[in-house]
Image (cartoon, helix red, strand yellow):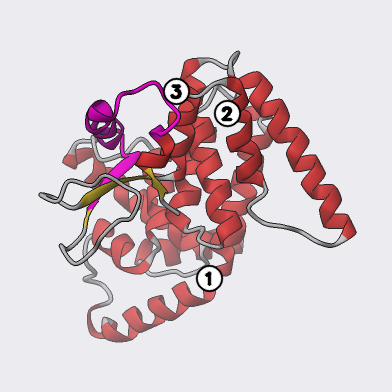
Amino acid sequence: PLYLGADLFSNTDIRTENHPRHHAKFAKKGLATKIHFSSAFRFHGLKVPTVNNSLWFYSIQGLFRVAFEMYSKQEQLAVLENFQSKQTLHTEPRSRDVSTVRRKLQDLHDKLSESPADYLETILLLLETVNQCMSGNLEEKDVKEAVLALLKAKDWGGVYSSPLLCCVGRWLGQQFHAANSSISHKVEGFKVHHIERISDLPPAEELTTELFPEAMRTLLLHWMGLSDESTLEKRRSEYPILLLILEFANHNLITGVAHVLYSSLICK
């Protein structure tokens, strides 16, 4: 949803002639946008310059940013209450959930003034994600941004005793395991296509790119210290190892080295 900028600024101390400057400031942060309308549109009750016939609108993040920067505490609370009441739930169990949400929002409102400034961006992002979830418009990129913001919110401790890393690792493993059949299908097609030159396969990096999901490659590349900043020579020298790991982990052997190693391990 978009929120009309004129409405958001209507109860502030900012003079009307200064609104465009503030709108532009929020637009630079990706929180507001100007929408131009054709001359056929007329807006009743709004002073819109006929020269450009445009209006400023704010995202939910922009709404909360304006509220936290320009509204009184009472007005901020009203925004939060209006936000959480967007969906009316009628059943008794859900009513209890709504009451719980209201209490949580009240707690959030009480703590906002004490929260560190660098947490505000994360809070706004999470509120936007919640709003999209409630509206049924939640997309993968939105979840990615919210999860990444939480992961970067603080130092979560060592790798040997991290419930968070265990949870993420378990989820990734389950997703990768579920993709095994599609990977096997792709590998089998590759083998059929290259049956005449199985001993003269493309380079390891090309094989991993063609046959395995990007997420698997990304995980191992960063795990092995072979991110985009790595030198080309280092990547070339380490990619055969990465390919072997993917072959074994996915139970799809492609290279001669993988077949020899697998046979050696099984015999033992």
Quadrant of residue 247 within the rendered picture:
bottom left
CA gap, disc 1 to disc 2? 53 Å
Quadrant location, the C terminus: bottom right
Report the amino acid beneath label 3.
Met
Which residue carries the number 2 mark? 75
Q: Position of residue 99 (x, y in %)?
A: 81, 43
Is 37 left or right of 115, judged from the image as shown? left
* Element marked by disc 1: helix
Residue 70 image label:
3
In this rendered view, identify the residue nearer to me: 127 or 227.
127
Is residue 48 visible to us here?
Answer: yes
The residue mark sitting in front, 1 or 3, is 3
Under circle 3, the secondary element is: helix
Is residue 166 shown above or below 184? above
Task: Please state the horizontal and vertical placement of residue 24, each as a whole percent of the image.
Answer: 23, 33
Residue 73, image x, y percentages = 60, 21
Taking the magenta stretch, the answer to whether it contains residue 16 is: yes
- Per the rendering, the mark at residue 118 is none
From what the image shows, is residue 35 above or below residue 16? below
Region in magenta: 9-35
Residue at 46%, 50% in the rendered image: 142
- Tag 1 near tag 2, CB within 8 Å: no
Q: To which residue does mark 1 refer? A: 180
Kind of element beneath mark 2: helix
Image quarter hosting the N terminus: bottom left
Which residue type does callout 1 highlight? Asn
Question: For the residue carrying disc 2, how many other residues have a C-alpha within 10 Å: few (<14), some (14-19), or many (20+)?
Answer: some
Q: Residues within 10 Å of mark 1 (few under 14, many from 20)?
A: some
Contact? badges 2 and 3 (CB < 8 Å):
no
